[in-house]
Image (spheres, helix red, strand yellow):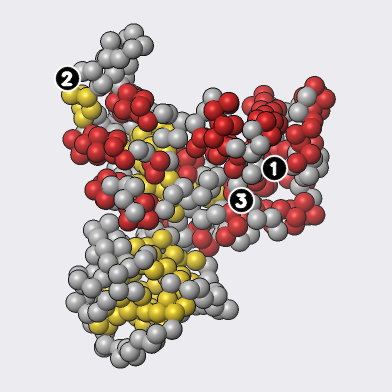
Amino acid sequence: MQAMYDPTVVDAPEASTIHHQDAPSSMRQGVYVLVAVDGPNRGQTFVLDGNAPSRVLVGQSPVCTVRLDDRLVSRRHVAIELTEQGPRVCDLDSTNGTWLGPTRIVEAYWREGEILRLGSTALRLDVLPVPQGRIPEGQDQFGPIVGASASMRRLYPLCQKLAVSDVPVIIEGQTGTGKEVLAEALHEMGPRRDRPFVVFDCTEVPPSLVESELFGHERGAFTGAHETRHGFFEQAHGGTLLIDEIGDLALHLQPKLLRALERAEVRRVGGSERHRVDVRIIAATRRDLDKEVQEGRFRDDLFHRLAVARVELPPLAKRRGDVALLARHFARLQGAGTDELNPEVLARWEAEPWPGNVRQLRNAVARHIALGDVEALGEAAAPLAGDGFIELVLTRDLTLGTARQLVVDAFERRYLQRVLERHDGNVTHAARTAGVARRYFHKLMAKKRLG
């Protein structure tokens, strides 16, 4: 989108640096427009609205939403996070630094009318009114994704467009924010809904087996390969393959994945024949892939191939007003009336930090419905994980899935605590005793809020 704007005089930078600037007390809400008032892209505008990801990259790289033709700008110079308080700019260890007005910044909120300088480029922030209908009032969910906060509602128009398209998508967000749920929603609301939705989790498979799991293997390819096996790519043929925790994929395996994506074909381990696959790829990660690329742990070309579209799910702590909405939604899914969640419980939950995000809230609702006390399955849950606890769950007449999950959660917490105590808190030794990968053990600890 091009437009002509008069250049703005930019003050010469000073030596002071802002590492973090508090959110502005008020910020006019609307569509954010970045206007290039100086530099090689002068006169060009970049619109950040509901069609933009919540974390916008600015730099020379082709994967950047705002791509600049400025040799003094780094490939990934800054990230702009679109928050309810306004855009927040974060310098990505750029070579020449980032300046907001006269001050060099590391991280700061960008206010309307201020000038952001990167290299020889100066960008002004304008805020325009939201076009009517851009973010429908009252829309509080996208498929199974529930949320009426501004940070969630802003994502819905983008998700609606991605659902009917076939482009690769990267879904980013903390553990428990609902990345897999969103990926399945994109599949179910798109043209491939009647075809397979297959999930491959990079954290659950040892690196030595990833190639066989993804691409399959022929009979006799290695010890134990007693029969030919189709990999996840072939299993997802015609449908969608979600590669979960793509940021944990070993570096030496990334070229093989890139080759399969670019050629739309796979070769099974131990075989010579190539098999064509028609698969839509969605990748999910809790990691900052931009940083992983910068530090050499993730290939730039693979990132470029996957990041055709990006969606970043905000943590629950930043979804103002969504806790009560989600809690009532989960209560209904459990077959319980919303009157079981009294105002005191909801108020207490609204004040919680929710490090486990939506998944943690869902479990808290299930536990509250089962035991009638929001605190009953916190740290006090572990001692109950025996016959008495099972009897208590059974008295609630829950569905099999809910009852089983409550018992499993309590058991896993007790097991993790016991094995950690046995090894004096050494996660590596505890994971070895448990027979799981260290990363997966960490994942379980985070899920149970241990450590």
Foreground residue among 112 and 121: 121
Q: Amino acid at mark 3?
A: Pro
Seen as rendered, the residue at the extreme top is 226
Asked if residue 205 can be seen in this view, the reply is yes
Q: Position of residue 139 (x, y in %)?
A: 53, 55
Q: Amino acid at mark 2?
A: Ser
Picture quadrant where residue 421 is located:
top right
Foreground residue among 192 and 213: 213
Picture quadrant where residue 224 is located:
top left
Picture disc at residue 304: none
Label tally: 3
| Residue at image coords 51%, 60% | 151
Q: Which residue is mark 2?
A: 272
| Residue at image coords 34%, 74% | 97
Q: Which residue is mark 3?
A: 355
Q: Which residue is mark 1?
A: 364
Which is more N-terminal, label 1 or label 3?
3
Foreground residue among 204 and 426: 426
Contact, mark 3 vs mark 1 (Cβ under 8 Å): no
Report helix, strand or loop for mark 3.
loop
In the rendered image, the vertical position of residue 8 relative to residue 208, given as above or below: below
